[in-house]
Amino acid sequence: MFRNNPIGFILSIILVPAFGLGLVLLIYWWLKVKGISFTVSNERITLRKGILSKHINEVFLSDIRNVQIKQSFFQRIFGVATIAISSAGQAGVEIDVDGLRNPQKIKGIIDRHRRN
């Protein structure tokens, strides 16, 4: 959480003494992060979101047309990024995952599986 958004994390910590507001924000943020699963297999990429409710988005590797890596200044410092995946099936981004470590390695895995 700190690596992905250090300013938001520090502000949440500062707000903990203010009626526990920062603690509520941190717990919500932590649950949101724990409820995300990003999987790259040899056939598809799957993004699962949610703890109580679930949202699942899959893109077959053969359909992928674009993989974007977006990094803010702080994300570059901490080695995390947002990866956005587009396919031929829809206009725009279908899978968008924030805060992934080693983004170049993940893109390399996706590219390697796309070629097979």
Image (spheres, rainbow, N blue to C red):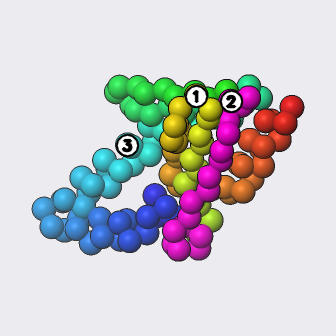
| Quarter of the rendering occupied by the C terminus | top right
The kind of residue tagged 2 is Asp
Residue plotted at (53% across, 74% down): 73
- Locate residue 108 relative to residue 69 in the image: left or right: right
Q: Residue 82's x, y, as percent?
A: 55, 54
Decide: marks 1, 2 in contact (CB < 8 A)? yes
Kindly identify which residue carries mark 1.
89
Q: Which residue is mark 2?
A: 63
Real-space CA distance between mark 3 and mark 2, rounded to the nearest whole angstrom: 31 Å
Task: Count neighbours of disc 2 (C-alpha within 10 A) and say few if under 14, some if 14 to 19, many if 20 or more.
Answer: few
Cβ atoms at labels 3 and 2 below 8 Å apart: no
Q: Position of residue 114 (x, y in %)?
A: 79, 35
What residue appears at the point 50 percent right and 51 percent down from the top-left corner? 98
Residue 11 at what x, y percent from top left? 30, 70
Does residue 24 appear to the left or right of 37 in the view shown?
Answer: left
Q: Residue furthest right?
A: 116
* Residue 31 numbered tag: 3
Q: Based on the displayed image, in which of its 4 quarters is residue 69 positioned?
A: bottom right
Q: Amino acid at mark 3?
A: Leu
The alpha-carbon separation of the residues under discs 1 and 2 comes to 7 Å
Going 78% across and 43% down the picture, which residue do you hit? 111
Q: Is residue 63 magenta?
A: yes
Crowd tier of the residue under label 1, counting other residues whose Cα lies within 10 Å: few below 14, some 14–19, many 20 or above:
few
Q: Mark 1 or mark 2, which has the lower sequence index?
A: 2
Give the mark toward the camera: 3 or 1: 1
Q: Magenta span covers which residues?
A: 61-77
